[in-house]
Image: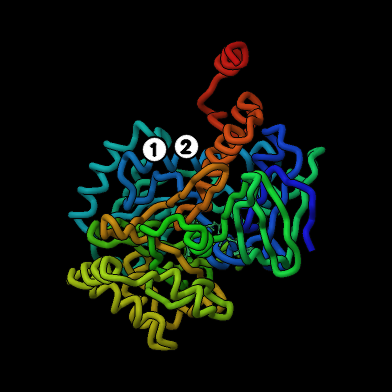
């Protein structure tokens, strides 16, 4: 059956990326008809689920795997999420205030941490250096049984934890509360997207066919498959990286604790996070291991996996380069062993002890049902593994691939996409309203906003 109504925008995927775009289009543009397709019966059942990710709002202040430039970008993106949470009354429902720190262990890491503090304190003026005396009072378990010196760089009372599923639900509700025609099509899987002879798009689902003037695909690993089915993005392949977690049986820490990055490793060092789904018990992770799946806890569709892997000479070369490096080879093996039932935590405990030296394997349990899949992107032309997001864009058609910190960046990516759709469709984006509610709220004074309004 063909639904004849022509939508302004169709969004494929109801994770935090798809729903943040729905909200941004509904609230800040004059587009009237928007439709969102989600193949499961609720939003955010895959990576945006709090059981799948680390629930961190990545601000860039304690993530030692970020360069100064990356931190600046992430800071701006994350401020949109924290502004939303504060301005739309979502503190303690979607976003939670807490304390956080980056922990350095041993003299070498302490020297690196001090240098990082000097470099980053201008960007994050609220950061403090916490010595052992302070930490012994503040997080005593960090010191129990410790022989090496430690130092931390931390912040208190920030929005540190986000339940990105609750955030997605909030985005949908805010969109439905506008006077726009918003259609939420749950349990409806998009199977094909084609361009029709009028320059619009035909979206086929497992039951119906729809038409839209623009389409944004925010379908995780599947975004690339849709792009390639339409002849785009042939230069990319996906390396699916699973991430698992371990819980402590009781709560050991009140703060988020990140550790110093080994610069040779492509994925962030293990951290400890108070978990909002588990009474704030400490959750360690994520691990990082190659897993031949696109969805962690759902049936494997072999054809999709083979297409996503897109294996050829250049992809094989990227794999070979990763394996050639001794540190990465060991890391891959270690992460693989950590998945072995019962035995895995005996290996993982070594990482956990960097944070909690007195912890034993008996204090840990594999977080069954938790964990997700990071669709890491391989650039076949450059023959390298990309670590951030990627976007393919053409004529009102956008495909987003969003590995970590994609949830943190969701509103920033949505802003970019909404502005681009407005340009293509000749629609209006209300920059003043967006700025005053979401963007640069803390940095922009009222006078500056009024000045911008006059100019607009
Ligand atoms: C272990 C791990 C830890 C992470 N930790 C963090 C963190 O702490 N902070 C952070 O910011 N980010 C983190 N991330 C990354 C973050 O989870 C993702 O970037 C983010 O959730 C991506 O959102 P999304 O909406 O693009 O994808 P998803 O949440 O995966 O949503 C895609 C949606 O598309 C739907 N879909 C797919 N195909 C179709 C179709 N054909 N038709 C209809 N619907 C379809 C799916 O059902 C799904 O709902 C982590 C990721 C992992 C794996």
Residue carrying label 2: 76
Residue occupying image coordinates x 40% and y 71%: 309
Residue carrying label 1: 72
For the residues marked 2 and 1, what is the alpha-carbon distance in whole angstroms? Answer: 6 Å
x and y percentages locating residue 367 in the rendered image: 52, 76
Disc 1 within 8 angstroms of ligand 1 (CB)? no
Residue occupying image coordinates x 38% and y 57%: 258
- In the image, residue 295 above or below residue 47: below
Residue occupying image coordinates x 24% and y 56%: 263
Q: Secondary structure at mark 2?
A: helix
x and y percentages locating residue 403 in the rendered image: 45, 58
- In the image, residue 22 above or below residue 456: below
x and y percentages locating residue 305 in the rendered image: 47, 74
Residue 194 visible in the snapshot: yes
Q: Nearer the viewer, residue 443 or 173?
A: 173
- In this image, 301 relative to 187: left or right? left
- In this image, 242 relative to 336: left or right? right
Q: Nearer the viewer, residue 323 or 96?
A: 323
Q: Nearer the viewer, residue 361 or 130?
A: 361
Q: Secondary structure at mark 1?
A: helix
Q: Quadrant of ligand 1?
A: bottom right
Disc 2 within 8 angstroms of ligand 1 (CB)? no
């Amino acid at each position: 059956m063909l639904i004849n109504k022509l939508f302004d925008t169709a969004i494929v995927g109801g994770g935090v990326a798809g729903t943040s775009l729905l909200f941004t289009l509904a609230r800040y543009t004059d587009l009237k008809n928007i439709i969102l397709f989600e193949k499961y019966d609720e939003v955010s059942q895959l990576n945006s689920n709090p059981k799948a990710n680390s629930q961190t709002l990545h601000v860039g202040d304690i993530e030692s795997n970020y360069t100064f430039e990356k931190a600046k970008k992430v800071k701006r993106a994350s401020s949109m999420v924290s502004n939303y949470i504060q301005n739309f009354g979502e503190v303690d429902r979607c976003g939670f205030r807490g304390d956080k720190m980056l922990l350095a262990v041993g003299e070498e890491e302490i020297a690196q941490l001090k240098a990082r503090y000097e470099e980053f304190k201008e960007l994050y003026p609220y950061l403090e250096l916490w010595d052992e005396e302070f930490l012994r009072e503040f997080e005593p378990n960090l010191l129990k049984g410790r022989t090496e010196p430690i130092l931390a760089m931390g912040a208190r009372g920030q929005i540190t934890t986000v339940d990105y599923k609750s955030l997605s639900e909030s985005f949908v509700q805010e969109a439905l509360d506008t006077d726009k025609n918003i259609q939420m099509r749950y349990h409806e899987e998009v199977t094909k997207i084609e361009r029709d002879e009028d320059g619009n798009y035909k979206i086929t689902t497992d039951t119906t066919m729809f038409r839209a003037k623009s389409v944004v695909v925010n379908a995780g690993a599947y975004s690339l498959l849709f792009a390639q089915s339409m002849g785009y993005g042939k230069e990319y392949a996906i390396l699916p990286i699973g991430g698992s977690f371990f819980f402590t049986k009781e709560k050991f820490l009140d703060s988020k604790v990140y550790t110093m990055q080994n610069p040779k490793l492509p994925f962030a060092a293990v951290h400890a996070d108070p978990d909002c789904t588990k009474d704030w018990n400490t959750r360690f992770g994520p691990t990082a291991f190659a897993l031949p799946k696109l969805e962690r806890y759902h049936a494997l569709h072999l054809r999709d996996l083979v297409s996503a892997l897109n294996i050829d000479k250049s992809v094989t070369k990227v794999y070979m380069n990763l394996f050639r490096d001794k540190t990465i080879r060991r890391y891959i093996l270690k992460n693989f062993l950590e998945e072995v039932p019962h035995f895995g935590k005996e290996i993982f405990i070594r990482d956990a002890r960097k944070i909690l030296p007195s912890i034993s394997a008996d204090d840990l349990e594999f977080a069954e049902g938790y964990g997700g899949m990071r669709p890491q992107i391989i650039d076949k032309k450059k023959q390298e593994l990309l670590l951030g997001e990627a976007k393919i864009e053409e004529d009102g058609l956008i495909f987003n691939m969003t590995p970590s910190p994609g949830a943190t960046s969701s509103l920033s990516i949505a802003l970019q996409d909404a502005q681009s759709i407005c340009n293509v469709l000749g629609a209006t984006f209300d920059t003043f309203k967006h700025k005053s509610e979401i963007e640069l709220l803390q940095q922009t004074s009222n006078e500056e906003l009024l000045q911008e309004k006059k100019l607009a």
